[in-house]
Every structure is written in structure tokens, then in C-alpha cells.
């Protein structure tokens, strides 16, 4: 080779290398451009500890989700993650059981068998350029870690059609665990019926915010929504209408079991509620024998409360309750059965107290623990009975004095059917207007004098559906307030600041949109467009 040719070849090699260098620099610059550091990502609920690092992980078509060998539950979490990532990325990430601790370009879900100081629901999430590792004591922790990972991806990960990517996750480490063990929402399917598909969509929204309880209000004056094989008229007649006179509906036992399973796969416990002795018109209309005069009442499609009561002096009524509880308890893997007990204005107190005492026995004989609205504290509470504070602080204090734990659902903070302000067209406002800031700025542990964190099991946000008839309206009342309630249940009070939260929530606009959620654009929040 002569000198001229050699020079030209060297020049080619040099310019080739130079081009490669430019490409590499461009890619890494773009990468940095498109990844917000981990601690600046808008995470809700805010994790307990976030330590950002340089760089980011890039999910690829060939990435694999590896899961601790030997745990079916952990493997299901892997499948769930693969399913969450599929629509927007188009990747079909395989899930494989493994014993390895390192895998380049992959995601690892590891169970530590209790070596982490993060309880049953906590997790550690570690993102490096090389790999992502979620470690937890229990599968529930892996599941919550997956929800955090989901929020670390760009908003477009929530879309249901294929998006361009790139799928970058900022590097760093998160250690996280919840402040309260019970973090729930309630859906009233009695005033208006919601289909099993609607309930599943709601469950998915709860899972996203790391809630772990769905309380279903399954019966009320306007409708009975759960099939009871030994008392079939409850649904065929008592479930045949709803507020406003629509056709109502009910869940067959097969459908209910499927909902329980769907929730369980998302580490959510369904708490069934059969409200009694009041709020029972649908049952009283289905069976005359439940009334003191033996005559069936008419179906009711209005929105009044406090006018109905089971006949508390009849043995048949307790046989009825035992049958209902028995059939529902048999489909319920969770520990709780909610007996309602609220607004029984048509039941004299001298009848109400022995009624609640006797019903607590029935629930215990059926292997479940009682939850009831705060009025039940007027009875003699048995050990393990939990009261749900919604309106009356005195009742709640009475309950705590009897040793009961409390679920905090103050109507003027967490009732999702309360209007945001005077211009909200949906909802009611008997407990006041509940703007997004007001729904967030409170502490369960200091709200009711004499009720402290040690007395509190957790927090729950009920959605009553007198005015809510479809999922778009449901979403509008639920979001964004439920996101704030989820943070109250999860994040330590010392880390919760409205001025910080409102910015994170404002940044969530794009994610809500990508999820197709119809949320209320509160003027108290700086929404990012
Ligand atoms: C309730 O809002 N009646 C519990």
C-alpha cells in the first residue's frame, strides 16, 4: 500500500470513528434530555425514601422479567407487569423464574423472605443503567413496587395503543412502605348499579394508587345487588331497580367470586357490606316476613334515608341475616364483613343496641370480623369490631373507649360524592364542599380528639352514587381527590406538604389523560399542560 492510499484509509477510519462518537454523544444527550431525575418525578403516593443516581435504564424489546423462583404469587406480579407494559411499548416481555441476582437489560422481582425492614407491603426499587430490581418481603410489596416503577416510566406508558418510546426509567433507589395498613375506597352499587366490568376498572384505579381495600356497599333501600341463593327474591325483585327508576342489576355469585379474584390478584381485599337494620327497603320489599306487620313494602327509587328497618324482634330476621352472611362469607377470603348500622332512624335505640349485639355474634360465628359505621359504637362492641368514622366524633370516641379500631372516613374530607364547589353539577353537599386542597390537608391521627394513630386501622374514601350513574361521572368525582387520600394512607405525615403535593398532582395531568381518566381540573392545582 502506498503512502497516499494509507493516508486515505486512515482518514476513512478516523471519520468513521468520529461519526460513531457523534451518534453516541447524541444518544446520551437525548437520553438525558428525556429523563427527569428520579427525585423530580411526580410520584403519588410520595415514597418514603428516594435517592436519585445518574443515568437511566432503557427498556428494550428483548428485556426479560425475572421472578424469584418458587413463588406463584410473585410470578403473577411479573405477568401483571408484563401486561401493564405491553399496550404502549408493543413489547411482549417474557416472565421467567430464576435464582439469579443480576441480568443486564432486564427487570428482576425478588422476594427476600423477610430480610428487609419494610413490612408486608413495603419494597425497595433499584434502577441502574444495567437493570431494575424490585425487592420485597411479600408479593404485595413487589406489586406496590411495580406501581411505582409504572409511574417512573413516561406518561405514555399508560396508553392503550403502541407509542414510539424510548422507554427510559431514571436511575436511583426507592425504599417505601405504607403508614396505614388499611387503605380503601367504597363504591355504592346499590343507589346505582355498576357492572362487573365497571368494578374491575375501579379496582385497577385503586391498585395504581396502592390502595388495598375495596368496600362494596351491596344493599340499600333502592337495591339489593348480590345473589343470595337461599333468598332469591332479594335480587330478582329487590335488585330490579335503582335511584331514578332504572333497571338496576345484581352480581351473580359467580360474578362476585370473579370480582373477588380480580381484586385479590391486585392485592386488594373486598369488604362486603350488607347495611342493617336500616337502609333495608329493597329486602323489606322482597320478603314481607322481614317486616313487623308481615307485609312486603314497595320498591323505592328516591334518595331519602332513615325510613326503613328490619323487624328486630323477629327470629326469622336473624335467620335471614345468618343465611345472607353465610353465603357472602363463603365467597370472601378477606377477614371483614361490614354490617352498616348507619342512619337507622326508624329503629328505636332500645331495639338497635340488642340488634347490633346479636349481629356481631352472627358475623363471628361465620368466621369474620365486624366493621360498622360509627353509630354501632352505641352497642357493646366485641373484640375485633372496627368502627368507621363518617360523621359523629362522639360515637367514634365511645368506640375507641371500648377498644375498637377506627377506619377514618370523615364525610367533609373524604366523601367522594361531595361537590368540589358550588358549580359542581354532580354530587351532594350536605357535608360541605370538598375541594382538592381540603381533601388533602388533614391528618387522620389528629382529626378526632382522643383518636390517635394507634387507634386507627386506616382511611377509606366512600363514593355514594345517588347522582352518579356511569364511569365518566364516577371518575370526575373520584379524581383527583382519591390520589390525595391514597397519599394520606401511605406517606408519613411528616413528608406530606400541600405545596409539594399540588405540583406533583399538577404534573399528573398527562398521566390521567394517558389513562383516559375524566378528572376534575381543580383551580387549586397548577395543572401542567
Ligand atoms: C353514611 O354516609 N350514611 C355512612
Image: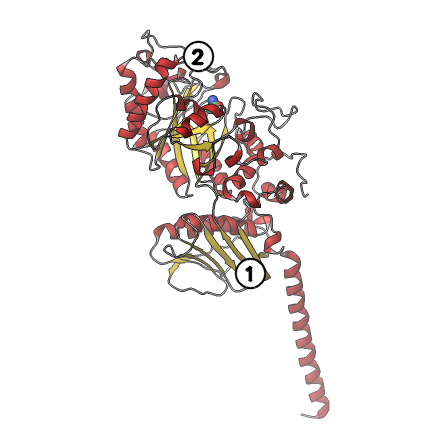
Q: Nearer the viewer, residue 151 or 161?
A: 151
Q: Nearer the viewer, mark 2 or mark 1?
A: 2
What mark, if any, has residue 307 been given in the picture?
A: 2
Q: Could you tell me which residue is drawn at 44 percent across and 25 percent down? A: 374
Instruction: Give the residue number, with chain letter if any, for mark 1.
Output: 57
Pick the front one: 325 or 487:
487
Find residue 13 and report its horizontal and vertical position in percent: 66, 80
Asked which quadrant contains residue 5, the reply is: bottom right
Q: Residue 327: where, in percent of width, then height?
A: 29, 28
Q: Confirm whether residue 334 shows in the render.
A: yes
Could you classify mark 1 by the number of other residues whose Cα lies within 10 Å: few (under 14), some (14-19), or many (20 or more)? many
Q: Residues within 10 Å of mark 2 (few under 14, many from 20)?
A: some
Q: Position of residue 146 (x, y in %)?
A: 48, 50
Task: Give how far across and how far down residue 139 sits, in percent.
Answer: 40, 50
User: Alpha carbon of mark 2 to alpha carbon of mark 1: how far?
Assistant: 60 Å
Q: Quadrant of the N terminus?
A: bottom right
Specify whether 505 is left or right of 464.
right
Task: Give the mark nearest the N terminus, 2 or 1.
Answer: 1
The answer to whether residue 133 is left or right of residue 18 is left
Q: Residue furthest bottom?
A: 2
- Image-quadrant location for residue 216: top left
The residue nearer to you, when weighing 112 against 329, is: 112
What is the secondary structure assignment of the residue under circle 1? Answer: strand
Under circle 2, the secondary element is loop
Q: In the rendered view, would you say 92 is above or below 202? A: below
Q: Nearer the viewer, residue 66 or 423?
A: 423
Residue depicted at 39% across the width and 41% down the height? 264
Disc 2 Cβ-to-ligand 1 distance below 8 Å = no
Residue found at the far right of this picture: 4
* Residue 276, placed above or below residue 496: above
Placement of the C terminus among the 4 image quadrants? top right
Amino acid at each position: 500500500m502506498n503512502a497516499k492510499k494509507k493516508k486515505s484509509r486512515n482518514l476513512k477510519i478516523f471519520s468513521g470513528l468520529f461519526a460513531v462518537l457523534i451518534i453516541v454523544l447524541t444518544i446520551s444527550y437525548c437520553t438525558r434530555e428525556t429523563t427527569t431525575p428520579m427525585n423530580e418525578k411526580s410520584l403519588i403516593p410520595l415514597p418514603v425514601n428516594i435517592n436519585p443516581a445518574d443515568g437511566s435504564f432503557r427498556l428494550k424489546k428483548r428485556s426479560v422479567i425475572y421472578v424469584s423462583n418458587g413463588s406463584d404469587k410473585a410470578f403473577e406480579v411479573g405477568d401483571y407487569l408484563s401486561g401493564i407494559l405491553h399496550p404502549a411499548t408493543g413489547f411482549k416481555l417474557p416472565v421467567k423464574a430464576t435464582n439469579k441476582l443480576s441480568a443486564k437489560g432486564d427487570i428482576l422481582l425478588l422476594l427476600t423472605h423477610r430480610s428487609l425492614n419494610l413490612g408486608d407491603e413495603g419494597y425497595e426499587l433499584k434502577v441502574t443503567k444495567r437493570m431494575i430490581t424490585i425487592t420485597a418481603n411479600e408479593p404485595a410489596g413487589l406489586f406496590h413496587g411495580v406501581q411505582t416503577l409504572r409511574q417512573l416510566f413516561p406518561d405514555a406508558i399508560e396508553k392503550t395503543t403502541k407509542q414510539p418510546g424510548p422507554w427510559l426509567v431514571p436511575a436511583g433507589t426507592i425504599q417505601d412502605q405504607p403508614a396505614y395498613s388499611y387503605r380503601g375506597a367504597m363504591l355504592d352499587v346499590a343507589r346505582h348499579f355498576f357492572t362487573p366490568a365497571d368494578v374491575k376498572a375501579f379496582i385497577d384505579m385503586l391498585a395504581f394508587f396502592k390502595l388495598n381495600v375495596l368496600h362494596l356497599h351491596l344493599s340499600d333501600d333502592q337495591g339489593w345487588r348480590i345473589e343470595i341463593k337461599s333468598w332469591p327474591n332479594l335480587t330478582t325483585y329487590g335488585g330490579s331497580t335503582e335511584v331514578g327508576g332504572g333497571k338496576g342489576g345484581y352480581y351473580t355469585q359467580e360474578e362476585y367470586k370473579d370480582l373477588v379474584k380480580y381484586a385479590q390478584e391486585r392485592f386488594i381485599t373486598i369488604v362486603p357490606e350488607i347495611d342493617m337494620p336500616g337502609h333495608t327497603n329493597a329486602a323489606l320489599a322482597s320478603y314481607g316476613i322481614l317486616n313487623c306487620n308481615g307485609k312486603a313494602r314497595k320498591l323505592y327509587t328516591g334518595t331519602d334515608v332513615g325510613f326503613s328497618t328490619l323487624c328486630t324482634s323477629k327470629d326469622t330476621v336473624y335467620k335471614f341475616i345468618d343465611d345472607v352472611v353465610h353465603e357472602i362469607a363463603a365467597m370472601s377470603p378477606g377477614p371483614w364483613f361490614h354490617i352498616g348500622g348507619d342512619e337507622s332512624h326508624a329503629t328505636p335505640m332500645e331495639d338497635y343496641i340488642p340488634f347490633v349485639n346479636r349481629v356481631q355474634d352472627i358475623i363471628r360465628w361465620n368466621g369474620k370480623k365486624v366493621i360498622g359505621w360509627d353509630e354501632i359504637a352505641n352497642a357493646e362492641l366485641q373484640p375485633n369490631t372496627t368502627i368507621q368514622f363518617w360523621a359523629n366524633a362522639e360515637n367514634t370516641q365511645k368506640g375507641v373507649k371500648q377498644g375498637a379500631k377506627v377506619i377514618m372516613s370523615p364525610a367533609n374530607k373524604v366523601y367522594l360524592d361531595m361537590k368540589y364547589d358550588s358549580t359542581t353539577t354532580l354530587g351532594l353537599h350536605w357535608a360541605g364542599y370538598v375541594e382538592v386542597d381540603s381533601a388533602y390537608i388533614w391528618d387522620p391521627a389528629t382529626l378526632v380528639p382522643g383518636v390517635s394513630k394507634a387507634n386507627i386501622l386506616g382511611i377509606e374514601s366512600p363514593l355514594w352514587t345517588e347522582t352518579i350513574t356511569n364511569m365518566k361521572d364516577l371518575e370526575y368525582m373520584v379524581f383527583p381527590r382519591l390520589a390525595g387520600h391514597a397519599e394520606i394512607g401511605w406517606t408519613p405525615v411528616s413528608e406530606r406538604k400541600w405545596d409539594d403535593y399540588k405540583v406533583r398532582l399538577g404534573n399528573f395531568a398527562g398521566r390521567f389523560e394517558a389513562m383516559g381518566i375524566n378528572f376534575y381540573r381543580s383551580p387549586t392545582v397548577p395543572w401542567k399542560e
